[in-house]
Amino acid sequence: MTNQEILGKFLSLPAEAQIQVVNLIVFLKQKHLYSEPQSGSPNIDLMNDPFIGMWRDREDLSSTTWLRNLRETEWLKTDG
C-alpha cells in the first residue's frame, strides 16, 4: 500500500476515527521512542565534569547533621 493510498483511507474515515488514528500514532511513537535500545553508552568523564563536586567549596555545608535531622523529621510525619 502506498502512502497516497494510506492517506486516502485515513481521509475517508469519519472525524472521530481520524482523531483515534492520530492518537494511536502518537501513543506508538512515544512507546517506541523510550523502548528503542541506546546505541552504546555515552563517553562521560565524571571525574572532570563540573557538576560533580559543585558544592565542594561551600563552607556552610560542611556538616550534614542538619539535613539528616530535617529528613527524619519530614519523613516521619503522617497525614492526619
Image (cartoon, helix red, strand yellow):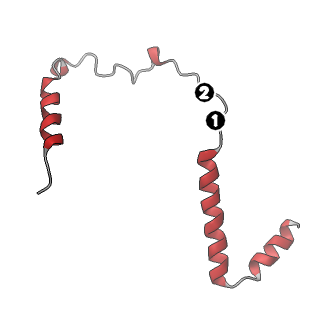
* Residue located 13% across and 23% down the image: 65
Determine the secondary structure under disc 2: loop
Residue 70 position (above or below residue 16): above
Query: Can you give x and y, in whole percent of width and height, for residue 54 in the image?
Result: 33, 22
Q: How many marks?
A: 2
Q: In this view, does 66 lie to the left or right of 23?
A: left
Mark 1, residue position = 38
Q: Are the two marked residues, 2 and 1, in contact with CB atoms closer than 8 angstroms?
A: yes
Alpha-carbon neighbours of circle 1 within 10 Å: few (<14), some, or many (≥20)? few
**Which image quarter holds the N terminus?**
bottom right
The kind of residue tagged 1 is Gln
Residue 28 position (above or below residue 45): below
Q: Is residue 3 left or right of residue 66?
A: right
79 and 24: which one is in front?
A: 79
Mark 2, residue position = 41
* Residue located 15% across and 19% down the image: 63
